[in-house]
Image: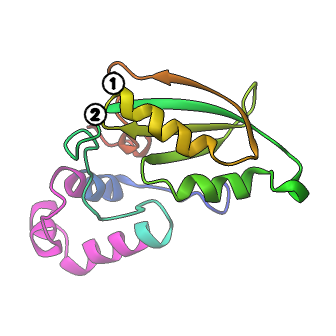
Amino acid sequence: MSSQEREVDDLDRRVIDLFAAEPRIGVLEASRRLGVARGTVQARLDKLEAGGVVTGWGPDLSPAALGYPVTAFLTLEIRQDTESGGGHDPVGAHLAAIPEVLEAHTTTGAGDLLVRVVARSNTDLQRVIDLVLADPAIVRSSTVIALATQVSYRVLPLAGVAE
């Protein structure tokens, strides 16, 4: 186990499962339902957060409900020469400034970055792609449009928590 990994025990899983199912439950009610002291629940939550297991408490938002029903994945090839403005970090900073870019990952293979974007329509997707390609360090891109989501982003099964 690396220094970043944290062992998740049965009580941790129960705490995670309860807060994933009912994020607004509150520590006192969680302690009542789990049959442990309030301080124990709070300590477990603090430890899970400090260890990086729990990464946030904000609401999960739906891009489609916000008016962005189109999801696409862009594979970008970039200049590697950092002296001419290329490289992963400057391109990542450019991508981070575009609200429709939901995530970007450095990858192996034919492309250098895999970018998930959303748009208001297929026509609007062209606008988003043009914003992405405005960085001169991007030399080539390819785009695939997601038609349906078969498995949404999830992490709970990795912690042994059922969804």
Q: Main secondary structure of the magenta part?
A: helix
In the rendered image, the vertical position of residue 52 relative to residue 94, given as above or below: below
| Cβ atoms under marks 2 and 1 closer than 8 Å | no
Q: How many marks?
A: 2
What kind of element bears circle 2? loop
Residue at 48% over, 47% down: 101
Whichever of callouts 2 and 1 sits on the residue coming sooner in the sequence is 2
Which residues make up the magenta segment?
Answer: 18-47
Residue at 52% over, 59% down: 97
* The magenta stretch spans residue 30: yes
**Residue located beneath label 2 in the image:** 69
Left or right of residue 17, residue 4 in this image: right
Q: Residues within 10 Å of mark 1 (few under 14, many from 20)?
A: few
In the rendered image, the vertical position of residue 76 relative to residue 137, given as above or below: above
Cα distance between the residues tagged 2 and 1: 12 Å
Question: Can you give x and y, in whole percent of width and height, for residue 31 in the image?
Answer: 15, 69
Pick the front one: 68 or 31: 68
Q: Nearer the viewer, mark 2 or mark 1?
A: 2
Q: Residues within 10 Å of mark 2 (few under 14, many from 20)?
A: some
Residue at 9% over, 69% down: 29
Residue at 32% over, 20% down: 148
What kind of element bears circle 1? loop
Label 2 sits on what residue type?
Pro
In the rendered image, the vertical position of residue 37 relative to residue 79, given as above or below: below
Question: Can you give x and y, in whole percent of width and height, for residue 130 in the image?
Answer: 55, 39
Question: Can you give x and y, in whole percent of width and height, for residue 64 in the image?
Answer: 24, 38
Q: Quadrant of residue 48?
A: bottom left
